[in-house]
Amino acid sequence: MMGRTTIHILRAVAVYSMVATRLLWLTYQARETPEAPCRAVLRDSEWQALYAATHKTNVLPEHPPDLQTAVLWIAKRGQLVLAMFPALH
């Protein structure tokens, strides 16, 4: 019988695996079609939240950024998280 800690770890690994898979796929898409609008792979709510968080504003552009730019913003957000939580390194 598995303990609670084991179950929590397995759930976390499952979530991290899904996130890593999506990030890898996004990176691949950005390399293949960097000028494509990010709407090709991100929902409006996703790119809008990403834009607002990256630029610290609620004023959104009329058109979404290209895919390469959106993936760069995602990468920068990840670096910010690592800087805030050194134990994750």
Image (tube, rainbow, N blue to C red):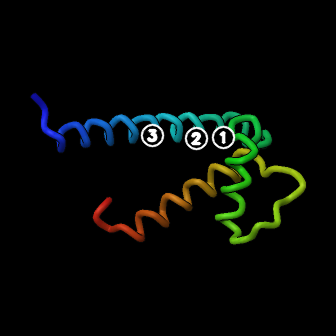
Within the image, what quadrant is residue 31 found in?
top right
Question: Disc 3 designates what residue?
Answer: 20
CB-based contact (under 8 Å), mark 2 and mark 1 = yes
Q: Which residue is mark 1?
A: 30
Residue 88 x %, y %: 32, 59
| Of the two numbered discs 2 and 3 in the rendering, the one whose residue sits closer to the viewer | 3
What element does badge 3 sit on?
A: helix
Can you give x and y, in whole percent of width and height, for residue 82 in the image? 41, 63
Q: Amino acid at mark 1?
A: Ala
Q: Where 55 sits versus 89, above or below?
A: below
Residue at the spot x=70%, y=69% of the render? 55
Question: Upstream in the sequence, badge 1 or badge 3?
Answer: 3
Of residues 85 and 68, the one nearer the viewer is 85
Real-space Cα separation, disc 2 to disc 1, in angstroms? 5 Å
Q: Indicate the position of residue 67 as horizontal and vertical percent values.
A: 72, 44
Q: Looking at the image, is mark 2 or mark 3 earlier in the sequence?
A: 3
Q: CA distance from mark 1 to mark 3?
A: 15 Å
Near-viewer residue (69 or 44) = 44
Question: Who's the residue at 66% across and 40% down the image?
Answer: 30
